[in-house]
Image (cartoon, rainbow, N blue to C red):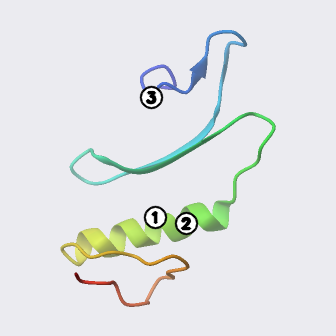
Amino acid sequence: MSKALSVYDVNTGESLRASFIVDPAGIIVAYEVHNQSIGRSAGELLRKLDAAIAVYKGGGGLCPAGWKKGDPLINP
């Protein structure tokens, strides 16, 4: 899977630290890739997942910076 998503480091034989959010249609809507030395925030990943779900279920819209589950979306 890491090779298919281009997060495999052939020099070290390891996968980079990566998170992907994929919508029901199979489209990657958010991703984040870090070197092994940099940690990730589970809380921020869950916030992004909540945002992706809200946009999908709401039929579109935008999530502003700092958006939290239950906050309104921006509808341009």
Q: Residues within 10 Å of mark 2 (few under 14, many from 20)?
A: some
Q: In this view, does 60 lie to the left or right of 68?
A: left
Amino acid type at mark 1:
Leu
In the rendered image of this protein, does residue 58 appear above or below residue 31? below
Q: Which residue is identified by label 1?
A: 49
Amino acid type indicated by mark 2? Leu
Q: Quadrant of the C terminus?
A: bottom left
Image quarter of residue 60: bottom left
Q: What element carries label 1?
A: helix
**Residue 35: percent from left, percent from top:** 71, 34
Residue for point 48% across, 24% down: 6
Q: Nearer the viewer, residue 1 or 12?
A: 12
First reached walking from the N terminus: tag 2 or tag 3: 3
Asked if 25 appears above or below 6 in the picture, the reply is below
Mark 2 to mark 3: distance in Å? Answer: 20 Å
Would you call the spot at circle 1 few (<14 residues within 10 Å), some (14-19), or many (20 or more)?
A: some
- Local SS, label 3: loop
> Mark 3 to mark 1: distance in Å?
19 Å
Q: Name the residue under label 2.
A: 46
